[in-house]
Image (cartoon, grey):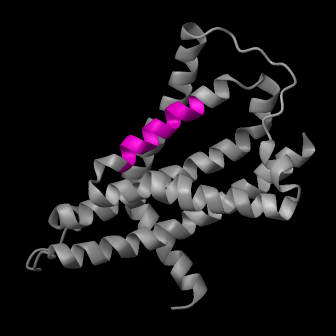
Amino acid sequence: MNGADFFRSCLTVASCRLKTFVLFNFLFFSCVFGALFLLQFLLLPPVYSGWSPWLLEAFLGNWGLMFLGVFAFNLAVSAFVMVTLPGFVFFPLSVGFLLYRAFLWAMLLYAVPSWLFLATLPTLVLEGEAYVFAAVAGTITGMSWFKPAWLFKTEAGEEELSRAEGFRKGLSECLRLYIIVALLLFVAAILETVTILSI
């Protein structure tokens, strides 16, 4: 299988789980903006004084290293460890941690000025979408060994998959979804680095 065919198979896996993506997108982004709306009434207005959230720039001092640091951290820790991996153990945990991340984002966004929110919005949308893909990947992998017959419906007359076979198939789908996660986070890291350096 060449690179183009492999990427096409990644898109096929994503399109087969379209309903799950729509649901997770709705849950994540409605949680972010719903929590942000509620925080307007629950917390005091934030005070902006010498706003300088970009400690990463001062710490790394090099845009190339900054980009690599942002990309590697978001892919390895924020997406895989925090969102996908818990779903391997128990599949609802992926969506649970996705919603927890949405609430954390709302807390962070509440504390930034409007102009900075607008400047970072494209990055937030791309990163958010990547975390949705990561949550779907974790949910599929966790469900693949827990309930393979329900996840991978077979045609009439075909034998149902065993848990081991289901898990292997779930990992294969997870890998393909993670190609898309990596691409989204790659573009988001470029935008984030450019935004940091231009502010």
Instruction: Report x, y in % for residue 80.
Output: 48, 59
Q: In this view, does 135 lie above or below 35?
A: below
Instruction: Report x, y in % for residue 174.
Output: 41, 68
Q: Which residue is drawn at 65% across and 63% down?
A: 72
Instruction: Report x, y in % for residue 93.
Output: 33, 47
Left or right, 97 with reference to 45: left
Stretch of the chain drawn in magenta: 94-106
Report the predominant secondary structure element of the magenta stretch: helix
The quarter of the image holding the C terminus is top right
Q: Which residue is drawn at 48% across and 66% down?
A: 177
Give the farthest residue toward the front. 59
Q: In this view, does 136 lie above or below 38?
A: below
Left or right, 104 with reference to 58: left
Q: Residue at x 53, y 76 (%)?
A: 8
The answer, for residue 99, to whether it is visible in the render is: yes
Give the farthest residue toward the right. 198
Instruction: Report x, y in % for residue 18.
Output: 41, 55
Image quadrant in which you'd find residue 169: bottom left
Q: Is residue 97 above or below residue 182?
A: above
Q: Residue at x 29, y 53 (%)?
A: 91
Magenta-span inclusion, residue 178: no
Q: Is residue 188 above or below residue 195?
A: below
The answer, for residue 17, to whether it is visible in the render is: no
Left or right, 44 with reference to 194: left
